Image (cartoon, rainbow, N blue to C red):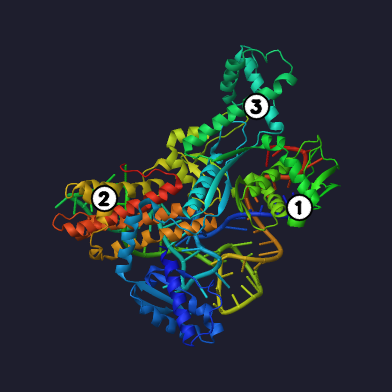
Amino acid sequence: MNTFEYFKEQIVDILNGLAAAGVLGEIADTARISVEPPRDAKHGDISTNAAMVLAKPAGLKPRDLAIKISAALSALEEVSAVDVAGPGFINATLAPSFWHARLGEILEAGLAYGDSQMGGGRKVNIEYVSANPTGPMHVGHGRGAVVGDALASILAKAGFDVTREYYVNDAGAQVDVLARSLHLRYREAFGETIGDIPDGLYPGDYLIGAAENLKARDGDQWLGADEEAWLEPLRRFAVAEMMDLIRSDLASLGVEHGFFQSERELVERGGVDEVVQVLKDAGLVYTGTLEPPKGKLPDDWEPRPQMLFKATQFGDDVDRPLAKSDGTWTYFATDMAYHLDKHRRGFADLIDIWGADHGGYVKRMNAAVMALTGEKDSLDVMLCQMVNLLDQGEPVKMSKRSGTFVTLAEVIDQVGKDVVRFIMLTRKNDAGLDFDLAKVVEQSRDNPVFYVQYSHARCCSVLRHAADMFEAAELAADSLQKADFSVLSDPAELNLIKSMAAWPRMVEGAAEAHEPHRIAYFLADLSAAFHALWTKGARQDESLRFLNESDKELTRARLALVKALAMVIASGLTVMGVTPAEEM
RNA sequence: GGCCCCGUAGCUCAGUCGGAUAGAGCGACAGAUUCCUAAUCUGUAGGUCGCAGGUUCGAAUCCUGCCGGGGUCACCA
């Protein structure tokens, strides 16, 4: 249950009651009424602005209306205290029994706690990673992979029908370069000395293995052949090899896409011709010459008539070229075709996760989707800022040129999948992220990965010790659910339940805002509430220990609390794609 | 020069579609351990929310202009 949604309904009922009694006019719009946790817990459990929002149409002073609403609110059995504060906020404290019921709900739901129907089964398409098939993934790709994957999981949990896609950029000049680079390594595989890799070709040694594989499959048939003969087969071979590499990187990160769309396949199938025709029919294509960019001029710039899309009609700064001077399509044209294809497959909501270096393409892609679908805001492009890879505060040198850049696989090898995934979600996607190889594995308070994992492991530890007092079956969630929760009355215990009960609202909020990083912060807060209770019992007040040999019923209730917490943390970590640790 | 993102405590960052006295961790200072994992916890100090206007009952949040940092800028993907 989303506590705040529930009480919003209660308050709307109260308002309708007041309207019926003639105190208020008709309640036209309840959308502006918010029911939220107060910023300061001292103000109670829930807070609403209803009186301030409705005072003007009601012709009452906010505080006077607040008093009328609060009278009705305090009559609810779930509410133990109501208070009017400030300009007209209504704050309510909820009865312990309400929170105890939430505990039972969590134990009932288990990992499914927080599942929501908010999405109503609406189809969402989320495209992420889409790293070029020219080499292994690096750490920056990893961020997009994790952000996209976690967001997809949140949306699924919030009731959307989610499809996870990867766009394979296997067309265009860069794949020719890849094929030529492979051919060089192929010659090397036959013992030829190739010397330095020429400028403009990919120097990475990951092509050595691919060349060996090519040699094993095709023998020496491409050795003396003209480029014309081998370019096409090597292109296909190289892309397949690189995608194997990338798929393996994704697998080691626990990321799995449901669908890979090949750019090349899309072009060959006539997708671009089709999208261009659609735009032409709408009168959105013309041939024109663009102004040179202001500021520094590219060396080889020359005025040239081009086939242009009228992006400016949809909010972009200039019209955008669809075809290159050699007659092939621009990347933008093929990507438009891809987005039209997604739309036609029935996705009303599109999400793209890109690196920040593609920020300049956001406007035109939004313009394109608007032009093609007639809808506004159906595409959300989320940009992931740079990841700064550090080791004990010192930048790790990353040079693609020398081929010595650190790959995602190496980082996962060093610190583990769970650490990489968690850390990638500790910042908003549009803020830069420092990833310190030494710090992320530190076992300390300021490492959120450890802190959250440790709280889960502590729960498991308590439950293991509880096996001395109870049969295994008694420690199962459905058995603990029957415990008498009314003995849980300490503020620290109730606070912990309140923190857990915030999870459903958190899921909906993160899904709606497309902000997976909120989960990481939520789990850190939740863990803090638990560590506080733990230490209170261990150091200050022995009566708060979870295990109490002399009071089995109390212990059962506390174990229910611990079990529920482990479940909520596991629920959150699962959304992040992180495995909950049972022991550390 | 245009566009996009960022600017919150000494440092690293949260801040819920505009809400109350702006929060957390680190660092600093003062404390807590016979005990379920001290790998933790409790408390204190620390702020013109980059600057200046505007919108309104109310702005870190929305709008405009400026300052500072980063990214990007036909024919790459």
For the C terminus of chain A, the image quarter is top left
Circle 2 chain: A
Query: What type is the residue that disc 3 sits on?
Result: Arg
The answer to whether mark 2 and mark 3 are in CB contact below 8 A is no
In the figure, is residue A241 to the left or right of A450?
right
Query: What type is the residue that disc 1 sits on?
Result: Ala
Q: Residue at x 64, y 44 (%)?
A: A357
Does residue A234 appear anywhere in the picture? Answer: yes
Establish whether labels 2 and 1 are both on one chain: yes
Circle 3 chain: A
Quadrant of res A302: top right
For the N terminus of chain A, the image quarter is bottom left
- Mark 2 Cα-neighbour bin, 10 Å: few <14, some 14–19, many ≥20: some
Dot label at residue A311: 1
- Mark 3 vs mark 1, CA separation in Å: 33 Å
| Residue A104 vs residue B20, the one in the foreground | A104
The residue indicated by pointer 2 is A476
Dot label at residue A236: 3
